[in-house]
Image: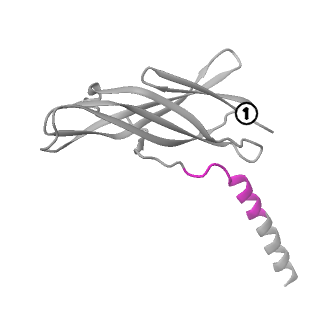
C-alpha cells in the first residue's frame, strides 16, 4: 500500500510539472477563419488592404514558456458587382525563416485576406469596407532576441521578443 501512495505522489508531481511547462498564451481568438492552404482566390484582385497593425497581447517568454500572443488588425475595401455581397472568408497565414546573415535569422509571417462573395439581390455594385482582428500565437526560436516580421500587402511591421532563460 505504501508503494502505491509513493507512486501516486510521483505521478502527481510529474503531471503538475507538465502543466507548468504547458502554460503559455492559450488559444488565439479569431474573427475570420485562418487557413494555411492555398486555394482558388479569383476575387482577390478586387480586395485592397489599406492598413495592417500588429500589437503584442502576451509576452512572458521564459524557461517554461516559449509562446507569445499578438493581435493583428487588417482593414481595407472589396469591390463587387451588383447582386454579390463581398466578405473576407478567411485569412491565409504563411510562416518561414529568412537568414539575415550567416548566424542570424528572422521569422517572417505573411497574412493575406481572402475575398469571397455570396448572392444578395439587395447588394449594390461598388466598394465595401472590411476590418477584422485576429489573434496569433508566436513560438520563439532561440534564446535572447527573436525577430518577427509581419507582412500584409505593402505593410511591414517588425517586433522583437526576448526569450529569457
Res 99 → quadrant: top right
Q: Residue at x 66, y 50 (%)?
A: 24
Q: Main secondary structure of the magenta part?
A: helix
* Residue 27, position as x, y percentages in the image: 55, 51
Question: Looking at the image, which residue is at 73% across and 33% down?
Answer: 162
Judging by the rendered image, the residue that carries numbered circle 1 is: 162
Left or right: residue 159 compared with residue 32 = right
Does the stretch in magenta take in 48? no
Task: Give the residue at x 43% y 38%.
Answer: 36
Q: Which residues are magenta?
A: 14-27
In the picture shown, does residue 54 fall above or below 65? above
Q: Residues within 10 Å of mark 1 (few under 14, many from 20)?
A: some
Residue at 31% from the left image edge and 34% from the top image edge: 129
Label 1 SS: strand
Asked which quadrant contains residue 6, the reply is bottom right
Q: Is residue 22 above or below residue 52?
A: below
Amino acid at each position: 500500500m505504501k508503494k502505491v501512495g509513493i507512486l501516486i505522489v510521483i505521478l502527481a508531481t510529474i503531471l503538475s510539472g507538465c502543466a507548468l511547462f504547458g502554460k503559455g498564451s492559450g488559444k488565439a481568438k479569431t474573427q475570420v477563419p485562418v487557413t494555411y492552404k492555398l486555394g482558388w482566390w479569383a476575387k482577390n484582385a478586387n480586395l485592397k488592404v489599406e492598413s495592417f497593425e500588429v500589437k503584442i497581447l502576451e509576452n512572458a517568454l521564459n524557461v517554461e514558456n516559449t509562446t507569445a500572443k499578438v493581435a493583428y488588425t487588417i482593414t481595407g475595401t472589396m469591390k463587387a458587382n451588383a447582386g454579390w455581397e463581398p466578405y473576407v472568408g478567411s485569412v491565409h497565414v504563411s510562416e518561414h525563416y529568412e537568414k539575415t546573415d550567416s548566424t542570424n535569422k528572422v521569422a517572417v509571417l505573411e497574412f493575406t485576406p481572402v475575398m469571397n462573395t455570396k448572392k444578395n439581390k439587395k447588394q449594390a455594385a461598388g466598394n465595401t469596407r472590411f476590418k477584422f482582428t485576429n489573434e496569433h500565437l508566436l513560438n520563439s526560436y532561440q534564446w535572447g532576441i527573436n525577430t518577427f516580421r509581419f507582412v500584409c500587402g505593402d505593410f511591414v511591421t517588425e517586433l522583437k521578443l526576448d526569450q529569457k532563460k
